[in-house]
Amino acid sequence: MKQIEHIGIAVNNLDFAVPLFEKLLQTNCYKTEIVQSEQVATAFFACGESKIELLQSLNTDGIIAKFIDKRGEGMHHIAFLVDDIYAEINRLKAEGFTFINEAPKIGADNKLICFLRPKQTNGVLIELCQEVDRNADKTD
Ligand code: ZN
């Protein structure tokens, strides 16, 4: 794994959390994005080579809403950047780890992502992410 790509933080309200993190990190939020498949609105901040991803649920029974119901606002996941997500999944499967979604999907920030089962990783939800080559689907 190359580096911590981002840390995901579950928040109730981006309207409140974005200006707060802008003050905290002393940098403006550089992107917001709705990820319909996950039913979340996200906001990104650069912090050195890594990022902070704030996550707000779009509905009351989404993954993030359930997380906050159970544990309150706070750190939700750590995402590690990998070169080849398929190779990394195979490597970790051989080590006995299991995945919430074994087939990577497109997440926020134009990344291929998958999540490990946190029961096997000391309760920490771990995301693997790989940059999607924006030119890969161009045929010319
Ligand atoms: Zn993430």
Image (tube, rainbow, N blue to C red):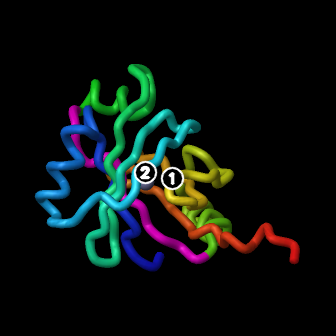
**Helix, strand, or loop for circle 2?**
helix
**Where ligand 1 lies, by image quadrant?**
bottom left
Residue 64 sits in which quadrant? Answer: top left
| Nearer to us in this view, 90 or 77 | 77
The residue at the point 57 percent across, 68 percent down is 130
| In this view, 19 is above or below 131 | above
The residue at the point 21 percent across, 32 percent down is 72
Disc 2 target residue: 120
Magenta residue check for 8:
no
Check whether the beta carbons of the residues at disc 1 and disc 2 lie within 8 A of each other: no
Q: What residue type is labelled 2?
A: Gln
Beta carbon of the mark 1 residue lies under 8 A of ligand 1: yes
Residue 84 picture location, percent across and down:
63, 73
Disc 1 target residue: 108
The residue at the point 55 percent across, 37 percent down is 36
| Nearer to us in this view, 14 or 78 | 14
Magenta segment boundaries in residue numbering:
72-83
